[in-house]
Image (cartoon, grey):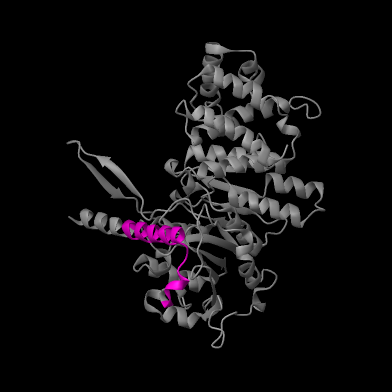
């Protein structure tokens, strides 16, 4: 059975449960609990013959033996008790709840859909891709907000190919969501290095990856996703449920690839004695940061720099404001250009993300040792935004859309880069700017573009109506978000 067949089989049953009021996100979460229990049971049998990490009274077989209200009550007890365990069990089951309304439907999912398959015997790419397919379908449910944890996979694949991780290098994502970057690095390393030794495979499985995720429910999905792809073990799962920005964890990595959560400022709501709610900015103050700010995106850029080994490499998805914002933004950009080699900027088109109103970029930089002169010599910019139009449904971004960028990036040797733009070829999307030119710009603004927008030149160059409508919505929502932040800032000063 192919990943698509498995996804379709499991997803079809979701529509049955929707009638009971279960959301897509709830369904994927319930599937995660049940799949984990089934796979733990399978690992106790030949040829694995492993000791089960699930207590016998709460294992898969205990579910199969029950029906009706007895099954319902037992399932609730399983979730409640396994959520109190430590390690992998705690990561998967913490704060878990039974979202089924009908015992018969729970029974059908357990017996007819999950128990019928031997999940452990399926290849990791089959079951892993099937689960990824479910996560993507969940992200498409815009009402749930799950899209903010899901970075488009074609974009992730292109970023990973540009970064070209090598065996033995450690990889981290401090805002890992459902694990897209970690999985793509794993797949890249496996495909590019088919003759890895047993020791190298063990290192890849157990010591290569580390992720942090703030939201427990998302960390649960990430842990299951990694497990299905063969990353981590029952005793050692490389995911931590924590606020990445709270402190320097002390760990350092060779590669950081991350798409931090959208949304500019962090706030905490405080209820006073009179019942009135006020909001306080969560300003992150850390000795390792260049600047103190409540802007989460700017803080993540600083955090990524901290997490990198010397000569470590980073790719960070950032919204436009990180490129041009004044104050702390300017200070951080100037420090980044000086102390790191900020070598590449990929300007992304709108219509890529399930979270709307986002204009984003990918910033690539390498951490360098202390030096008297600035490390950034040239910033190469690839403009995938101007005159490019994508939508999630009718014209989604595909991996070939990024072929030219990866070729221009020249992962084999960045010193061999050649611009596609020139005075004679003004439609080229790839050009470089010298350090002196960057720091002499107002506020060291990196929001640079040079291509003519064809739609401004002639009406016949306008994109399709649905694309145009989506881009207008993106622009309006982005502007609304900025105005909302200005209003909040003004309210705080009163």
Q: Quadrant of residue 161?
A: bottom right
Name the spot of residue 153 as percent of width and height, x first. Answer: 59, 53
Name the spot of residue 41 as percent of width and height, x first. Answer: 69, 24
Is residue 472 within the magenta segment?
A: yes
Location of residue 37 with respect to 179 vertically, above or below: above
Q: Please identify the residue farthest to the front as the structure is shown.
A: 460
For image coordinates 75% across by 40% down, the residue present is 123
Where, quadrant-wise, is the N terminus in this rendering? Answer: top right
Query: Foreground: 281 or 425?
Result: 425
Name the spot of residue 321 as percent of width and height, x first. Answer: 39, 64
Q: Is residue 163 left or right of residue 275?
A: right
Q: Quadrant of residue 111?
A: top right
Q: Is residue 199 left or right of residue 209?
A: right
Query: Foreground: 143 or 373?
Result: 143
User: Looking at the image, can residue 447 be seen?
Assistant: no
User: Looking at the image, can residue 47 be seen?
Assistant: yes
Q: How many marks?
A: 0
For image coordinates 71% across by 32% down, the residue present is 119
Where, quadrant-wise, is the C terminus in this rendering? Answer: bottom left
Is residue 90 within the magenta segment?
A: no
For image coordinates 65% across by 23% down, the residue present is 112
Location of residue 236 with respect to 264 vertically, above or below: above
Q: Which residues are magenta?
A: 457-481
Query: Foreground: 115 or 370?
Result: 115
Query: Foreground: 305 or 480?
Result: 480
Dominant secondary-structure state across the stretch colored magenta: helix
Location of residue 478 with respect to 440 vertically, above or below: above
Name the spot of residue 74 as percent of width and height, x first. Answer: 55, 16
For image coordinates 70% across by 45% down, the residue present is 205
């Amino acid at each position: 059975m192919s990943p698509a067949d498995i996804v379709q089989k499991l997803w079809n049953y979701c529509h049955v449960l929707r009638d009971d009021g279960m959301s897509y996100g709830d369904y994927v979460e319930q599937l995660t609990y049940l799949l984990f229990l089934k796979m733990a049971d399978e690992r106790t049998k030949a040829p694995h013959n492993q000791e089960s990490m699930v207590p016998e009274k709460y294992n898969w077989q205990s579910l199969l033996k029950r029906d009706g209200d007895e099954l319902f009550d037992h399932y609730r007890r399983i979730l409640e008790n396994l959520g109190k365990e430590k390690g992998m069990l705690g990561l998967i089951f913490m704060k878990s709840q039974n979202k089924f309304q009908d015992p018969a439907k729970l029974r059908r999912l357990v017996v007819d859909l999950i128990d019928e398959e031997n999940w452990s015997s399926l290849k990791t790419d089959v079951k892993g891709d099937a689960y990824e397919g479910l996560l993507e379908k969940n992200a498409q449910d815009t009402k749930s907000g799950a899209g903010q944890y899901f970075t488009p996979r074609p974009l992730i694949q292109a970023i990973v190919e540009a970064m070209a991780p090598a065996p033995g290098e450690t990889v981290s994502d401090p805002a890992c969501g459902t694990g897209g970057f970690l999985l793509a690095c794993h797949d890249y390393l496996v495909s590019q290095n088919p003759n890895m030794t047993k020791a190298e495979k063990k290192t890849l499985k157990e010591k290569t990856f580390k992720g942090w995720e703030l939201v427990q429910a998302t960390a649960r999905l990430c842990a299951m996703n990694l497990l299905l792809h063969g990353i981590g073990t029952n005793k050692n799962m490389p995911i931590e449920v924590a606020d990445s920005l709270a402190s320097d964890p002390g760990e350092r990595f060779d590669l950081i690839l991350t798409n931090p959560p959208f949304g500019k400022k962090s706030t905490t709501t405080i209820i006073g004695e009179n019942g009135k709610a006020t909001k306080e900015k969560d300003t992150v103050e850390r000795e390792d940061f260049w600047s103190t700010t409540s802007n989460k995106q700017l803080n993540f850029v600083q955090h990524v720099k901290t997490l990198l080994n010397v000569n470590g490499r980073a790719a960070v998805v950032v919204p436009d404001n990180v490129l041009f914002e004044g104050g702390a933004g300017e200070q951080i950009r100037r420090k980044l250009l000086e102390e790191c080699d900020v070598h590449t900027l990929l300007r992304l088109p709108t219509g890529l993300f399930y979270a709307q109103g986002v204009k984003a970029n990918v910033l690539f930089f390498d951490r360098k040792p202390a030096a008297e002169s600035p490390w950034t010599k040239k910033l190469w910019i690839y403009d995938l935004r101007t005159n490019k139009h994508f939508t999630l449904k009718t014209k989604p971004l595909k991996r070939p859309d990024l072929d030219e960028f990866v070729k221009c990036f020249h992962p084999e040797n960045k010193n061999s880069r050649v611009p596609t733009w020139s005075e004679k070829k003004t439609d080229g999307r790839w050009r470089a700017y010298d350090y002196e030119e960057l720091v002499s710009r107002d506020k060291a603004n990196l929001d640079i573009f040079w291509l003519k927008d064809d739609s401004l030149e002639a009406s016949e160059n306008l994109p399709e109506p649905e694309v145009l409508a989506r881009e207008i919505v993106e622009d309006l929502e982005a502007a609304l978000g900025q105005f909302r932040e200005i209003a909040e800032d003004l309210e705080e000063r009163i």
